[in-house]
Every structure is written in structure tokens, then in C-alpha cells.
Amino acid sequence: MTELKHWRIEREPGGLAWLIFDKAGESTNTLSAEAMRELALALDAFDREPPKGLVIRSGKSAGFIAGADIEEFTKVASAADAKALVQRGWDLYNRLAAVTYPTLALVRGHCMGGGTELALACRYRVAVDEPGTRIALPEVMLGIVPGWGGMLRLPQAIGPAAALDMMLTGRALNAKRAKQSGFADECVPPRVMENAARMLVLSGQPRRELPFMQRLMNGPLKGFVAAQARKQVAKRARPEHYPAPYAILDMWANYGGNALAVPADKPTSMEAIAASPTTKNLVRVYYLQERLKGFGKPDGKNGDFAPKHLHVIGAGVMGGDIAAWGALRGLTVTLQDQDIGRIAPAIQRAAAAFKKKLRDDAQVRFTLDRLIPDPSGQGARQADVVIEAIFENLEAKRKLFADLEAIAKPDAVLASNTSSLKLEDIAVGLKNPARLIGIHFFNPVAKMPLVEVVEGASSDPEALKRGMAFVRKIDKLALPVKSAPGFLVNAVLAPYMQEAMRCVDEGIAPEAVDEAALAFGMPLGPIELADTVGLDIAVAAGQQLASGIGEPPKKLMELVNAGHLGRKTGRGFYAYNQGKPQKGSVGQVPVGLADRLVKPFLAAAQRAVDEGVVADAELADAGVIFGTGFAPFRGGPMNYLKENA
């Protein structure tokens, strides 16, 4: 047979065969056209000499398979090209699923998209229990569908409700959840994974059968299940903005999970998806995210910074949640405030969050053990990263950092979470102002992926590099920004929200203002966003950026002066019941309202690029999408300006 470049076949004396995917010249396995052709050649070899069992595994330490080759996908120029790409994987994986000998996917590390679909085409699956094992069908995040059999086989493996949740959100399973759900037959530690794979593939063990009700939901009740799922999707995404989730539901419910079977004239067809600008822009967002992930990655030079101990000063909502997130991501965290009574609420919030996130009492205890109340501030002496999150008072911050400088390790990162004070002003009291940087989180910390890493006029480049390494360590996206009022995210949000509130002053209903923004593609209307952030915070942001956005809106000030600060007080622009806004009917949305709302948003993003707050337009788009939720399907504000010039 032709020698394989990306796959390796190894046969054992007893008849077991191993097919090892080790993509040449790459650190990660991706399913390029060449790799797929070679997989077909390997199956040809097994047709000629069938093994007693076949185990498919990765030859990479980085993971199983990261999915299809995104670079190749970006070169798809037509609906015909898109259908050919889907046909290739659909046919090949159906062939794998139909072989007469037993097959097993040994999944260790990331298993995404086409990799997950390959695993589903095998008779058995073993998931290796280690932190890096993540199994997902995230195609919807790129505006496409899992067309290589995922829509057919995942519902058969784990039931339609769980499968649709994964396919419609991109949510991943870890190894234990993979076993619990039925995706994996076994969940084993790395030391026994090969023996476990050998035993299972040769066992003749029947596949787990879905419970009766799940089989009904995969059969006669499909239409009902799809209709319910569609209602949930409609709460998050409009079909004109994000066609892919609606296509997934239609393809599963009406076409047996076969993307190729949908008639071309339907809005859920491959032709419609290929023609949608959403796909191109979401692929752009994927590359923007990859660029942000690159900041802070180890480069093997000068002893890469690997923080293990975080010290947070200020146990309020922001400080407490920063500390909790650090502990959840594996750091030892000391949390300082004036006394234990001020720290206790943050620990309680963290315990509740850990319980919800981890769902394992032992893991909750271990994580809480890493979050240490420290009213005396002793942890600052040993910490690799110190973050100040106290109230916004310049003199208090200056004194705090002067004290910290005297006791912190020489190479420790000293950072402020301030969003309204200049780093240069805070650094005045330091002997070495180059040590101070900004590490600016957003609320809620656990949900917002972006963290701005702020360079002051004197900040040391090495300190900034360590700050970004810390952000990467805790699984956030680091955005390098220059010190300027509002940095990037608040600088674009504030004028947008102020313009929305001026519309209310003019008599436009808050519901109509929010609807205009939602119709544009924002995840939340600006009025509800202001209520969620807190109207007192909105006033403070406006004062911070007063030179750019003028006087505060009248209704805003009336509400704040009356103590109505939004959701946290039960009333703002809307009244709140159990945290949910009580909205009236939208009524007529004025023509051009959406354009009016986003105009100051876009202008502020352009200004941030022009003034060098961010290095380029791509970073502005990345920061605004991941920091504000700006309509991802539009590819970012700078991309939107370019496309609508």
C-alpha cells in the first residue's frame, strides 16, 4: 500500500491493530483533506486484512483530534465546495461505522468537531481521565453544522436532549461526564488506557442501549423535542443572525442528521449556510480568539513565568470573584481585607459557585482549601501575582502599593484592577513605577472571558508579559491595552449606553431601545445592561469619560438619586422580580434607532485604534467582542465599519 504520511498502522501478534494519527509537521492533529484521504487508504488496508479489533488513537501529546482543518475551511469558495467537504467526511465515517471488525476510539486530550464525529463512528470509546480531555461538537460556534455524522450519532449515543445541548451550544464534556452520559464506555486513568482499550475492543461487549423514553425522543417524538429546543434557541439567537443552530435542529429532526439531504431552497440547507456572511465572520472571530490566546503563552525564553500563588486585596464583589476564579483554576489564593467579617461573604459566594461548577463535594473542598482568608496580608510576601481591587480612591491605592513594593517578591506582578484611575497616578508613590501594571477584569468574573492587561507610561514590558502569562494561566483571554480613560471596553460601552439612555429621555420606551439593539445582534439591550451593571456604576463610567460623552442623562440621574440602581436594588429603568426585568410591550421601534445606538459605539472603537489604545483594528474587534458581547456574527465593530463603508 502507499506509505502513509499522517497515520501509522501497528499490528500486534494476536490480531489487534492500532491506527495512530500523528499529523506530520504539526503539534496538533487536524483532519485535512490529505489526512482524510490517508484514513481511507488505511481502511482499504484493513479491508484487505481485517484485524480482530482496531483501536484509533493519537500520536500527539496535545490531544486526540482538534477537528477539521480550519485553514482549508476558509478556502471554501462556494456551496458546491462546502457540500463536497461535507460529503467527504459523511461517506468516510459511514464507511468506518460499517466495518465488520470492532473499532474503538481512545480519546485523550481535546477531541473536537470531526474528531468527536470519528470517535462516534467507532463501536466503542474510552475517555482518558485527565484535565485536558474535552469532548465537543463546537461547529455551531463557527456558524456551521457537524456534518460528518455527529447529528446522526451523538443523539443515538447520549440521547437527543443532551446531544442537542452539546451541538447547539458547543459545550464540552470532560472524561467523567463522557462516561456518565454514555458517550464513553469507559473512563480510565492514563496509566491503564492502552490495556483498557485492548480489553474492551476485543470483549464483544454490546453497546449501551438508550432508555426507552430516549429512544422515543429519537424516533416518534423527534418533532416535539426539536420544537422545544427551537424555543430555547430563539431566546438566545435569531435565525437571521445565526442560521446554524436552526439548521442543526432541522437536519436532525427531518433529515436523519444528513446535512446533504436538505433541499437547496430551504433556509436550513448547506447552500443557505454557505451563503451566510455569519459563517465567514464567526470564523474570523475564531482567529481573533486564537490571537488573544497567544498572548502570555510560554515561548521557552528567559524562564517562562508560571504563577502558582495569587494574592488579592479587597474582598468585595470584584476582588472576591477574582480570588475565587484563581482558586478554581488551580492557584493558591490568599484574599485580604480589613477583617475576616469582610472576607467571609466572598468565601461563601465562592463555595456556592464551586458547588455549582464542580458538582463533586471532594473537588469543592480541595478548591476551597486553596482559597485562604488573609486579613493580615501575609500572602503578599510569597505571591507571584498581587492584584489590588479596593475602592476607587487614589491616595488609598498609592499607599497600598508603596507598602506592597516593600514586601513583595522582586519578580512578583503588582497589578491594579482599577477602571477609572490612571496607572500613572497610582504609580507616583512607588520607588520603581515600572513594576505597576493593570489587570482589569469584568463583572461577572466567571462569565466574562476577557481581561485587559494595561500598560502605563512607565510599565516594564517584562511585567506586562508576566501579567499576560497570569491571565493565560487562569484561562482568560488577555488583551494588551494602553492606559487611557476606560481603556478599550468601557470606552466603547459608556457612550453606547449613554446614547441609549438619552433615547429614553426623549420619550422612547426602554423596551424599544433594547429591542433595536437586540435586532442589531447585541446579546443584551443597553438599558437592561445598564440595570445589570448598576446605574451607579454607569454614572461613574460617564464621569470617567465625561469629556467624550457629555452630561449624564436625566432619567439616569433621577433613578440614582432615588436609590434605584438597577437589578441589585430591584428597580432601575425596569422593575425586577427575582432578578428578571419586568418589561412591557415593545411597541413601534423607531426607524434608524439601531444605527443611532451603535454609532457612538463604533466611533469609540475607531478612536481607540487611532489613539493606539489597542495595537490594531483586529485587537479592537477581539476586545470588543469578548469584552462586551458585540454581535459576533458581524465580526467586530471595525469589521462592521469596513463592510458598511
Image (cartoon, rainbow, N blue to C red):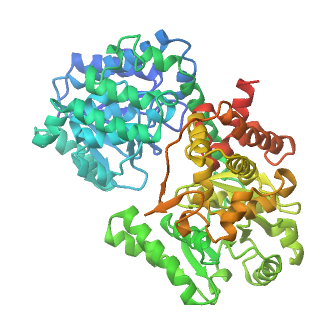
How far across and down, in percent of the image, does residue 537 sit? Answer: 68, 64
Specify whether residue 64 is in view. Answer: no
Which part of the image, by quadrant, shows the C terminus? top right
**Where 457 falls versus 3 (above or below)?**
below
How far across and down, in percent of the image, does residue 579 sit? Answer: 47, 62
Nearer to the camera, 78 or 520: 520
Tell me what residue is drawn at x 20 percent, y 22 percent.
Answer: 98
Q: Quadrant of residue 362?
A: bottom left
**Where 457 falls versus 114 (above or below)?**
below
How far across and down, in percent of the image, does residue 225 sit? Answer: 25, 36
**Where 139 falls versus 390 (above or below)?**
above
Tell me what residue is drawn at x 46 percent, y 24 percent.
Answer: 5
Q: Is residue 100 left or right of residue 138?
A: left
Specify whether residue 247 is in view. Answer: yes
Tell me what residue is drawn at x 57 percent, y 59 percent.
Answer: 532
Nearer to the camera, 526 or 119: 526
Tell me what residue is drawn at x 50 percent, y 80 percent.
Answer: 345
Q: Is residue 384 left or right of residue 350?
A: right
Q: Quadrant of residue 208?
A: top left
How far across and down, in percent of the image, does residue 254 sit? Answer: 26, 22
**Where 379 falls versus 477 (above or below)?**
below
